[in-house]
Image (spheres, rainbow, N blue to C red):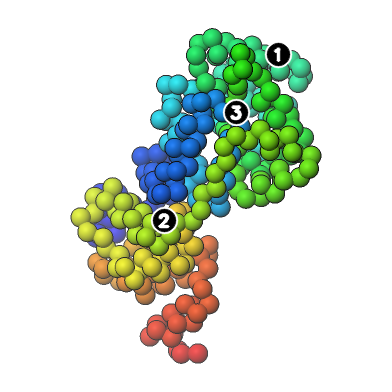
Amino acid sequence: MYVKHYNLKTRPFEITADPEFLWLGEKHQEAYAMLRYGVLENKGILLLTGDVGAGKTTLIKALVKDLSGDIIHTTIPDPGVGVMDFYRFMARGFKMDASFSSKGQFITAFGAFLHESFNRRKIVLLIIDEAQRMSEKLLDDVRMLSNMERNGVKLLNIFFVGQAEFLDAIGKQKFRALRQRITLSYSIEPLGLEETYRYIASRLKKAGAEVNCFTKAAIKEIHEYSGGSPRMINLLCDMTMVVGFSKGVTRLEKQTVRDAGRKLPGITIPRKKAAKATRDDPREPAG
């Protein structure tokens, strides 16, 4: 097993949304601080966007864990459902002791829940992941939920988390009122090269590594192939270590990264790199 081969306690690049594995680069730190402020100050509707694998879910879980004593929260992981099903998921997630068969019954029960939470000095947070999957009808209904206030204080904080397509969806004229109520918005960009160096080093250190087994050239290759996506960096680093172990090497060079990239269907190797990798590989005949 490569864990022992590289003197590690665990596999450092396993895909996980565990907050313990959270690495906050400059962009993630800024997003975290802004969103934490938005929740604690009852700012109402918040928005976090980013490409697939940018670290949105991990960031949200870390935020919720940090605020666990101050908030009552639930997460809808897939809002691609009808309005009533969405309401039922909400009620179950918030542990509401009520049953309802209509929208009106839900609004009444939910309003009572929000006022009770306000009396207990609790912040109520609804997190909607994969927000780009919401229907237009559901989006408008969720906007209406955000109207609930008491003494000028928002009773419900709504946290939209989604991909860039969500911005296109709410960019329509019919959602102008919703856009105006988004008080804080942040888009997580891919990691830069220097951040990729630090991200990989952090993961290795948490796994018990005393030295970085990736050369700088290998990390540069990883950054180019992954496009700076933390999830793709994890996949490529993990496979690179597997390939390196199979070759019996303890220092991972850029050629090992190229070999690993060929084994991952989700990795698109730049055309020039792919051609060079083929020429450099003695197992493959030159073009």
Quadrant hosting residue 136: top right
> Which three-letter amino acid code belongs to the residue tagged 3?
Gly
- Report the quarter where the N terminus lies: bottom left
Pointer 1 local density, CA inside 10 Å: few below 14, some 14–19, many at least 20: few
85 lies left or right of 158: right
Residue occupying image coordinates x 46% and y 90%: 286
Question: Dot 2 corresponds to which residue?
Answer: 234
> Which three-letter amino acid code belongs to the residue tagged 2?
Asn
Question: Dot 3 corresponds to which residue?
Answer: 44
Residue pushed farthest bottom?
Answer: 286
Between disc 3 and disc 1, whose residue precedes?
3
> Which three-letter amino acid code belongs to the residue tagged 1?
Thr
Residue 141 appears in the rendering: yes
Kindly report the distance in space between the C-alpha atoms of the residues bearing marks 3 and 2: 34 Å
Quadrant hosting residue 115: top right
Question: Dot 1 corresponds to which residue?
Answer: 108
Q: Where does residue 99 sit, x and y in percent of width and height? A: 68, 14
Residue occupying image coordinates x 49% and y 22%: 71
Between disc 3 and disc 2, whose residue precedes?
3
Q: What secondary structure is found at the residue carrying circle 3? A: loop
Between disc 2 and disc 1, whose residue precedes?
1
Quadrant hosting residue 221: bottom left
Q: Where does residue 232 sit, x and y in percent of width and height? A: 47, 58
